[in-house]
Image (cartoon, helix red, strand yellow):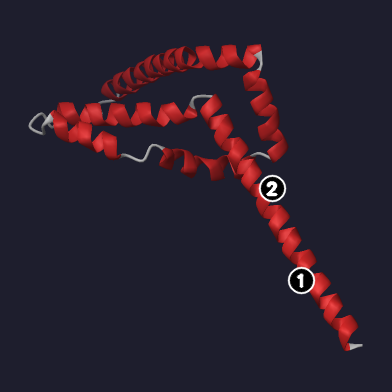
Amino acid sequence: MKRKSLFFFLFLFISLSMTGFLQAEKKNAKQSDIKELLILTGSDKIGIQMLNQIIDNFRVSMPDVPAEYWDSFLEKVNKEALIELIIPVYDKHLTHEDIKELIKFYKSPLGKKLISVMPIITQESYSAGYEWGKKLAEQVMEELKEKGYE
């Protein structure tokens, strides 16, 4: 009887361990696919572009700081860190199957085209939004002036 109990608990332990191992493997595969998707779509480069823009703003606003400092700072930045922060966001909102289908799409001719034109679309959309916001701000200022709230 003790032997049967021992075998039962051993079987249960191995089964639970394997389940945990398989779930960890699935999670690792999904995270690996998310990373592939981010790199495929150029999302890894967007973070670096944003960082460069921030540093360029610092260079302008702090002209006394030598360029070598900013260059050295950029060299020290862990460029993988942003991707590692974004992976859980994709993991939370998309299934592994979703990620696999997106990878297929972005590897297709249409997906590749979208990747190639997305920076232009984003820039033009930003410009359009900026102009829209500027006009609204002017409208608000004009209305406030008319009402005596200068």
Which part of the image, by quadrant, shows the N terminus? bottom right
What number of labels is visible? Answer: 2
Task: Using residue 21 as the reference point, say whether residue 57 is left or right of it.
Answer: left
Identified at 65% across, 48% down, the residue is 27
Placement of 37 over or under 29, stated as above or below: above
Q: Nearer the viewer, residue 15 or 103?
A: 15
Tell me how far mark 1 sits from mark 2, CA to CA. 20 Å
For residue 16, what is the image quadrant? bottom right
Image position, residue 48 (x, y; %): 37, 30
Image position, residue 96 (x, y; %): 69, 39
Residue 150 visible? The answer is no
Q: Amino acid at mark 2?
A: Lys
Q: Residue furthest right?
A: 1
Residue 76 visible? The answer is yes
Identified at 34% across, 22% down, the residue is 137
Q: CB under 8 Å between callouts 1 and 2?
A: no
Mark toward the start of the polypeptide (1 vs 2): 1
Q: Which residue is mark 1?
A: 13
Identified at 50% across, 40% down, the residue is 86
The kind of secondary structure element at disc 2 is helix
Q: Which residue is mark 2?
A: 26
Image position, residue 72 (x, y; %): 21, 35
Task: Using residue 6 as the reference point, say whether residue 141 is left or right of it.
Answer: left
The kind of secondary structure element at disc 1 is helix
Q: Amino acid at mark 1?
A: Phe
Image position, residue 2 (x, y; %): 87, 88
For residue 101, what is the image quadrant? top right
Placement of 87 over or under 113, stated as above or below: below
